[in-house]
């Protein structure tokens, strides 16, 4: 009897292979599914069923691909947005036995209408005492699911989540909790980076669960939350209904510099670390390091346009490619193993990105220069720490549509938490014709060590 | 904040790397310790401390080796059998902080006098609500620790364990449980093969915990248990006090057939699967497949005598070698990649082991033959299923000293649960001069499908 946790970085996504004796199920598979088949093989199990705890909006479900490869049946909760072409719809009565292990379904709507949780019983220990629960995006460790996907029904769905959480808490303090996301996910704000918990520990320490029993207070709390939702989510939601023809991940072609040059109708994405990008990069490229693909590709890239990747090496290119594949970007044409020396010799100029220390920035601001500060963090960060006096604020995901407030003929310093997102922002600005762009080294963490901020006002 | 579980097959031993931010501790390291250093490196942590939840008797602690390699301090519970040369003794007040994570010590004697449990707090979630507990050999999933190590104080230590378990249960239902052993360990009988549980789930389903509150009933239950203890345990206990000079694991030399022949003062141990041994093996060798080394090497091998291993290939030899190293068998001289064809051509005869079906055995017994049945399982198995009528019973570990009841000039059929231990027993008998030895195919599981047993009587 085993639970294998498969953690997918970037998405901060947790999926599970659960089994006993010779059968297993997969809960919320990601789109590159070989890992589940490999682990099932190691346990001597066949994958018999696949559960989706809800219609995912932040990645393309691997269920259609995995079902095609293994013959497993896909199960999805009731009340989806539309027909889930590749799945059977189940309800609260659904139960499945694998060896000595039984999985019962609990409908737990709120995050989405079709959200379910899956309760695990070790029937050898006891037939009616639950052991663990897979909570999808209803209950996380340290937070609960966001409820902003139905703006017209905001209070109703927050109330539904409240009731679902009460159902989960009623399972008992002793029940282990296995959620679908960990810290860093776009699906919640206050997720802990601890990956082990129980219903009781959440009941006692999860701030949102402390509101249980006061339904109105819970609804007020949830409807006051601010979340960002990239426009790309809608596309993934739709694809997670129709399932498309399951696209298997292809080999990513390595490109020559000549081939790269011929792909000038594509978006060129530099997936190296931001330090490398700052050091040398090709003009007109977007910096999007691997760890930021899941959160920002859906904002910053046109899904209709093909991509080419600029990477340090094949391994890095393939890792980035996997991150794009999980989001459904099936239009990656290849990668170039970036060689700025070769480019300089054969094609001409490459670019550097200038950084500036907090001290130099403070000094520049005191001198009354024309320097514009662009803070690309999120609303909750602006609220938590305040902002540098006079800063222009625009969330990185929405930056392209908010550049109107900045003058491209004057200096801009991009600012974020520690200096990574600010590089991405700078690469965007330079593509938009800003030519005096610098990045604050160490971001607000460096700034606040010596300099003050002012409260953020909307 | 992370807990990494390191599972060591054979010993069915669970050790843990626990850490946050840049510091980690190891709980109950095994003797081949590289895995802890590798995992700590992946988490960007240094190993700051090592805990032994008790003086181990079933394997050599890795604490002295790991301390030497990393500079970490070793902590051991109070009241050890003697001075633990390499450790500091701690008590109930001991606490250590790693990033946002705090570990508090609870003394939980009973299995041994020096047993401790370690309670984990995620202080970011809450400073006083425990999250998880590392229970050593006090509490397992589905069972509790054995209490037969102090025969003169059997009732006293069973009572101590009762009280320790009450202390653990008082932590709260929501607390996750991380024990030092899983199913298959010699340190308990009824361990579940499930590897996830909570205090509450154990309180509700663990048969031993159901006796809590009735101290006398608990003591009566524990003192009625039957456990086997190989004589080798005493040696390991002593070595886990003095720590010896920490012996690092050396490369295992590959031997030529010529070199092998010159090592005829050694015990030759065939570590291949029992099917291979049955097919062809060298005369005078002991069959001891890898999965049985932890449980039986301490019974069947003379610790004063050097070993050579006969294996299918280098990988198998090295895995077997690691299992011996964990037990403190530091006298493995090398391995021969077994080639029975070469042996036959250059040295002469190799041997096969005959198997017999349940039907053929039943028929032979009906004919009133002189066939002797040797059942090498354990007491609880004899009691659970009964035995074949007329079977001679001797636990495999104690077989060498119990052969007096069998005639070596008559046929013997060795019997176990499913047919593996019976091969080991047969190899022992053949070394002792029994020349008409067969193995019951499929063991008692096959026998019971068609034939009856009779109750076991002492």
Image (tube, coloured by chain):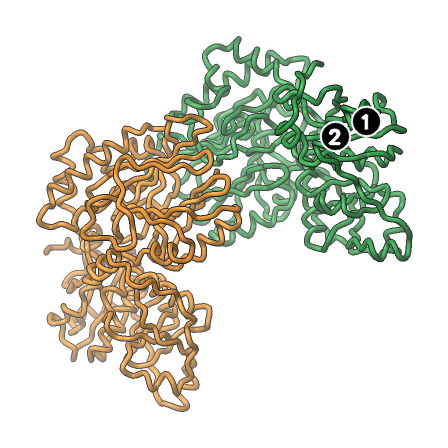
Chain colours: A green, B orange
Identify which residue, A84 or B84, lies in the foreground.
B84
Q: Quadrant of residue A229?
A: top right
**In the structure shown, which secondary structural element does the residue marked by tag 1 occupy?**
loop
From the viewer's perspective, is A270 left or right of A25? Answer: right
Q: Residues within 10 Å of mark 1 (few under 14, many from 20)?
A: some
Image coordinates of residue B439 in percent, x first then y, are 28, 69
Q: Residues within 10 Å of mark 2 (few under 14, many from 20)?
A: many
Q: Quadrant of residue B327?
A: bottom left
Q: Which residue is mark 2?
A: A361
Tell me the quadrant of the picture where the N terminus of chain A can be found.
Answer: top left
Measuring 64% from the left and 37% from the top, which residue is drawn there?
A61
Image coordinates of residue B228 in percent, x first then y, are 19, 56
From the viewer's perspective, is B5 left or right of A420? Answer: left
Q: On what subunit does the disc labeled 1 rest? A: A
Image coordinates of residue A160 in percent, x first then y, are 55, 16
- Tell me, yes or no, whether the two marked residues, 1 and 2, touch with CB atoms within 8 Å: yes
From the viewer's perspective, is A264 left or right of A120? Answer: right
Q: Quadrant of residue B349?
A: bottom left
Kindly tell me whether residue A123 is visible in this rendering.
Answer: no
> Are the residues under badges 1 and 2 in a single subunit?
yes
Measuring 42% from the left and 36% from the top, which residue is drawn there?
A102
Measuring 78% from the left and 46% from the top, which residue is drawn there?
A332
| Cα–Cα gap, marks 1 and 2 | 9 Å
Q: Tag on residue A371?
A: 1
Identify which residue, A28 or B125, lies in the foreground.
B125
Identify which residue, B162 or A20, lies in the foreground.
B162
């Amino acid at each position: 009897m085993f639970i294998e946790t498969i953690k997918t970085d970037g998405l901060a996504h947790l999926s599970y292979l659960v089994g006993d004796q010779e059968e297993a199920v997969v809960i919320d598979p990601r789109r590159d599914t070989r890992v589940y088949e490999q682990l099932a093989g190691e346990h001597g199990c066949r994958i018999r069923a696949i559960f989706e705890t809800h219609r995912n909006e932040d990645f393309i479900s691997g269920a259609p691909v995995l079902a095609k490869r293994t013959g497993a049946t896909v199960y999805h909760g009731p009340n989806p947005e539309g027909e889930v072409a590749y799945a059977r719809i189940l309800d609260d009565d659904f139960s499945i036995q694998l060896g000595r292990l039984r999985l019962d379904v609990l409908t737990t709507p709120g995050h989405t209408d079709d959200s379910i949780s899956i309760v695990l019983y070790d029937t050898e220990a006891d037939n009616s005492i639950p052991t663990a629960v897979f909570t999808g995006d209803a209950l996380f460790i340290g937070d609960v699911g966001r409820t902003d996907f139905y703006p017209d029904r905001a209070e109703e769905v927050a109330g539904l989540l409240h009731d679902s959480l009460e159902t989960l808490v009623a399972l008992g303090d002793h029940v282990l909790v296995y959620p679908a996301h960990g810290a860093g996910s776009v699906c919640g704000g206050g997720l802990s980076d601890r990956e082990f918990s129980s219903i009781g520990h959440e009941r006692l320490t999860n701030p949102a669960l402390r509101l249980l029993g006061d339904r109105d207070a819970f609804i007020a709390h949830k409807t006051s939350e601010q979340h960002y939702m990239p426009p790309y989510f809608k596309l993934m939601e739709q694809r997670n209904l129709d399932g498309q023809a399951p696209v298997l991940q292809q080999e990513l072609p390595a490109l020559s510099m000549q081939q790269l040059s011929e792909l000038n109708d594509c978006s060129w994405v530099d997936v190296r670390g931001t330090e490398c990008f700052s050091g040398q990069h090709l003009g007109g490229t977007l910096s999007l390091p691997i760890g930021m693909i899941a959160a920002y590709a859906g904002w910053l890239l046109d899904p209709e346009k093909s991509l080419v990747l600029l990477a340090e090496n094949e391994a890095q290119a393939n890792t980035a490619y996997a991150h794009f594949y999980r989001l459904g970007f099936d239009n990656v044409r290849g990668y170039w193993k970036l060689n700025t020396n070769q480019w300089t010799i054969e094609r001409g100029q490459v670019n550097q990105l200038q950084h500036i220390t907090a001290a130099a920035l403070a000094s520049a601001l005191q001198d009354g220069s024309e320097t514009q500060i662009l803070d690309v963090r999120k609303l909750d960060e602006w609220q938590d720490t305040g902002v540098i006096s006079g800063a222009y604020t625009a969330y990185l995901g929405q930056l392209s549509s908010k550049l109107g407030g900045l003058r491209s003929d004057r200096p801009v310093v991009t600012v974020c938490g520690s200096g990574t997102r600010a590089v991405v922002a700078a690469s965007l600005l330079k593509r938009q014709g800003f030519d005096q762009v610098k990045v604050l080294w160490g971001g607000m963490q460096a700034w606040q060590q010596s300099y003050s901020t002012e409260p953020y006002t909307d």
